[in-house]
Image (cartoon, coloured by chain):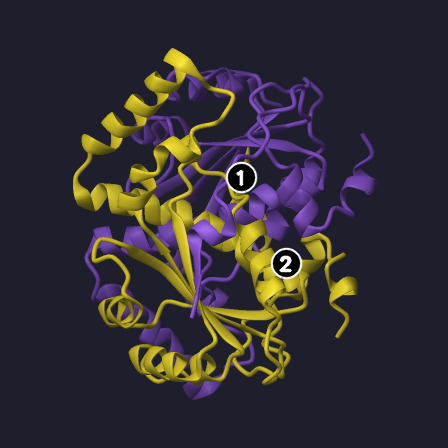
Chain colours: A purple, B yellow
């Protein structure tokens, strides 16, 4: 499978080609491919450029086995070349706001922006803050699935796992939230064809 | 701007080109382009193929003006060729589960799948159910932003609006949740260059 070719997949082609894949070739994923997929993922927008998403990429066999246990034994966890555990970490996102404020903002404008961000999140409950970061991270998850497909990799985003066990296995912060555990690798099955609502069924034009 | 050319944007190109755009040309967006962007958006995955996302696409001037008021006067609402209000509607998603269960499932397997889905959501609180649909819809929002860019359109996903006012203006269900109001049109500004965390800053490899 030519990665160079796959990189030319358009957004439409990637969305059409993508299916949830649960059986993978054992071929490992080169680190630079994973790096590039996460770089593209990180281009997702977030209010105030806060980028609350974080990732642990697991290809270690023993750790994948532990994650599989925490995911009710789902075989696509241990059987994938890698598993990307995506989490949002609002504590870290707010701690690093000086890094994410746009560099074009300087002086008083910069101080004002930092203060506005910190004040906004300080006024929220811990739960609401976590829910906010979780929602924004799900947008980036959409980018991740398309970026992986465009590079020739199949994925299966999973919600069926015990978040507290996964946090313990990977040493994630207690207040982090996990949009998905994503298995990724070269597909060894076709997956199910799409069966989607028509646009007319889900959209109204005013 | 050639739409045919723009449709060839790869996932990486679309992610790199996309910036939040707040000033647009007045050129209207052909209905078939909006339709195609929403078709690609709808290819986003969701557990059990539930597809809880719904859309109202507004290009009516008077309705855009009302939405702008509900969005604290943000000019990119009234000034965009169209505004896509995205919402998740779990009540409707569960009511239409017979339409979304994969057609390959028939007989007892189909009945079992429908029952499992209905039982799972019936066991949740109304808030948890709404939060679930909201999270999945944010994945589709990632698809929408890339699909729009690939078709030559700039976007600005906004969270700064009064959801209850927007629901009242558009007649959305009270229990729906709104991932974003997205202004969309041909860009008339460049937007800010990306300023993102490095992959090394947000990812750990195990």
Q: Residue at x 67, y 49 (%)?
A: A12
Badge 2: residue crowd in 10 Å (few <14, some 14–19, many ≥20): many
| Residue at image point 29% right, 55% down | B177
Q: Residue B51's x, y, as percent?
A: 42, 42
* Left or right: B11 as drawn, with respect to A49: right
Mark sitting on residue B15? 2
Residue A139 visible in image = no
* Marking on residue B204: 1
Q: In this view, does A18 lie to the left or right of B120?
A: right
Q: Which residue is drawn at 62% across and 63% down?
A: B32
Foreground residue, A181 or B48? B48
> Residue A73: image x %, image y %?
42, 14
Can you name the residue that lies furthest to the top here? Answer: B108
- Which residue shows up at 38% across the image and 45% down it? B52
Compared with A135, A160 (above or below) is: above
* Whether residue A140 is situated above or below residue B148 in the rendered picture: above
Determine the CA span between mark 1 and mark 2: 22 Å
- Viewer-proximal residue, A41 or B94? B94
SS at badge 2: helix
Residue B48 position within the rendered picture, expressed as x and y whole percent measured from the top left: 41, 30
**In the image, is residue A115 above or below residue B206?**
below
């Amino acid at each position: 499978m030519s990665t160079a070719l796959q990189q030319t997949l358009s957004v439409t082609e990637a969305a059409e080609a993508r299916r949830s894949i649960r059986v993978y070739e054992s071929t490992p994923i080169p680190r630079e491919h994973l790096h590039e997929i996460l770089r593209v993922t990180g281009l997702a927008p977030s209010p105030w450029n806060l980028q609350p998403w974080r990732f642990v990429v697991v290809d270690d066999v023993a750790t994948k086995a532990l994650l599989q246990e925490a995911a009710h034994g789902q075989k696509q966890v241990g059987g994938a070349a890698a598993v990307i555990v995506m989490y949002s970490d609002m504590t870290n996102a707010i701690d690093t706001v000086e890094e994410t404020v746009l560099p074009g903002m300087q002086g008083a404008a910069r101080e004002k922006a930092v203060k506005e961000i910190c004040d906004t999140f300080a006024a929220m409950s811990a739960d609401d803050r976590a829910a906010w970061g979780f929602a924004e991270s799900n947008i980036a998850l959409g980018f991740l699935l398309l970026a992986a497909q465009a590079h020739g990799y199949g994925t299966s985003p999973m919600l069926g796992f015990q978040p507290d066990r996964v946090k313990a296995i990977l040493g994630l912060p207690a207040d982090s939230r996990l949009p998905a555990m994503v298995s990724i690798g070269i597909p060894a099955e076709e997956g199910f064809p799409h069966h989607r609502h028509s646009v007319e069924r889900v959209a109204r034009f005013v």
